[in-house]
Image: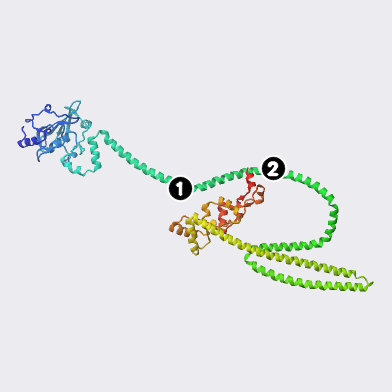
Amino acid sequence: MELPQKKKRISRELSNSQRPHSNAASTTSSSEQVEAFVEGSIIRITMHNFLTYDHSEVFPGAKLNMIVGANGTGKSSIVCAICLGLAGKTSVLGRGDKASRPAVPPSDDLCISRYRACGNLIITREIQEENNQSTWMLNKKHASQKAVEEAVRELHIQVGNLCQFLPQEKVGDFAKMSNIEILEATEKSVGPPEMFQFHCELKTFRTKERDMENICTEKANFLEKAKQRNERNKVDVDRYYLKKRHLDMIQMLEKKKPWVEYETARKELTELKKEREVAKRTLRSLTESQEPMMTRIRSVESQLKPIDQQMKELTNKIKDASLKCKQKHDQLELRNKEVDDIRQELSLKQMEEADRQKRIGHTKLMIRDLQKELENMGSIEDVTPHIEAINTELRSIQEEKAKLESEKSDLRRDKDEAHGDFARMQNRLRSLNDQINIKEEKLRSRFRDTHTALMWLRNNRDIFGGNVHEPMMLVINVRDARHAKYIESHIPVNDLRAFVFQRQEDMDRFMTEVRDKQKLRVNSVIAPSESCSQQPPSRPLECLKNYGFFSYLRELFDAPEEVMSYLCFQYKVNDVPVGTDKTKGMIE
């Protein structure tokens, strides 16, 4: 039948490559088209009893891009025919969920011819109204819908892609698409089939890359923290390996000790035997040569026994005086009082000596008188015993005088020594003050944060309940400057600049103030609850002197009770012997 005149007119307004025709007006054949078709181009669309058209044929050509026309001319019919004829879903059109329509003849026929290099592909679809079923044909042979979809997919046709097929009702959806969705649809539309797959893989790889970057960042942070932790533990590890080497060396030396002791004892025994033989020969010769002298000595010794007794008593007094001197050395503040006591005692002794001198003078006068009287008496009875008694008393008085002179000299010497000790103590105190100033200046130049915390502690010491000691390098006093190297090599610098606390709560209060509030980098330690400062060494020093050890490390310096207790507990300074060059020579 003829299409209405209006519909024919509208069909003529379509592009030259898209002309609808009825069964009576179809005068254009495919042979008349001169356009160069590409793979998948639509050559012809035939519609029978489909929407607006009872029967129509459209020849789009190779460059179909857009269908335009007035309302009611059948634009949507052509679009629906293309979609449904290419196995598209009705949801793509946005018009309904069924391909059939009511109040039409019992079936709709669609036929689409597409260009293909190996032979044109003709797709025919017959839609049944009653059961909403479709019959499919490929090149006029019955086929399944899945086969049709596969054939359409081989021609890279994507009816559901809005960048390739855009019905009028889907323009709003296209406008709502994001840039990413448009890019993906464009890739599917114009690119090779693997382009979108590559894009998806690229996005997957990018996601994996970001995940791996995050993992790498986390690993790098973990590595940095591990390096920092390793750096902090390096000192402990070095100390551990040093201790292990020392323990191995001690174990080896313990095994070699009996043999060394045996060799030493054997050599000493040999030398002693030789010395004994030499001494025997020397003794015999000296005994023979000194026998006359020994006889005289024995006679003199028998005469000097009383004098020896007095000398022993004098020696005991000298020892007592030496003991007093040592006590005075430890009690500097009592020196002046002791000196006053000595002066008073000296005055008494001088008075006693004056009395004795008077007695001696009287005795001498008595002797002269008695001698004159003896000369005058002539042959009178023998007065020798009386003279002997007087001479004995005179010797006794002279000995007592000598004894007092000796005591006076000793007291004067004690006085001079006390004054000298006092002067030395003052000089030592000034030297200690100078050393403290030098140490404090060194602390300020090397550890500025620790020096700042020290100044704060001195100004706020009253807020702490227990003893708080300044950094160890300030409170440790080395008795001999030559031994400072042993202490500095055994105690780490981090502990030498650490504050020592008696109580845990004081240390927490101090660290909260200087570390958390003032952001200072300082170290602090707490002394053991039970003092270890007087803990004895594991073996007496006498056992080690044969190997050149002369002292334990604890005996080389002075420190407050809590500081010494911490060092004994942490670094065993009470059990670390200090040797000489002789020790180095005997290490093996």
Whether residue 498 is visible here, answered yes or no, is no
* Residue 13 placement, left or right of 210: left
**The N terminus appears in which quarter of the rendering?**
top left
Secondary structure found at label 2: helix
The amino acid marked with disc number 1 is: Gln
Residue 562 lies, with reference to residue 198, above or below; the image says: below
Corner quadrant of residue 343: bottom right
Q: Which residue is mark 1?
A: 228
Viewer-proximal residue among 430 and 131: 430
Q: Nearer the viewer, residue 55 or 323?
A: 323
Q: Which mark is residue 193?
A: none
Taking the view exactly as shown, the residue that stands out farthest to the right is 379
How crowded pointer 1 is (Cα within 10 Å; few <14, some 14-19, many 20+) is rated as few
User: Which of the 4 image quarters holds residue 183?
Assistant: top left
Residue located at (84% from left, 61% from top):
303
Task: Report the number of numbered marks.
Answer: 2
Upstream in sequence: badge 2 or badge 1: 1
Mark 2–mark 1 distance (CA, rounded to whole Å): 51 Å
Is 538 left, or right, of 198 in this rendering? right
Q: Amino acid at mark 2?
A: Glu
Q: Is residue 171 visible?
A: yes
State the image coordinates of residue 397 (x, y, percent, origin top left). Answer: 80, 69
Q: Nearer the viewer, residue 38 or 5?
A: 38
Give the residue displayed 34% in from the left and 42% down from the top.
210
Q: Which residue is mark 2?
A: 263
Q: Secondary structure at mark 1?
A: helix
Residue 278 place in picture, x, y as percent:
78, 46
Image quadrant for the C terminus? top right
Which residue is depicted at the point 27% across and 35% down?
A: 195
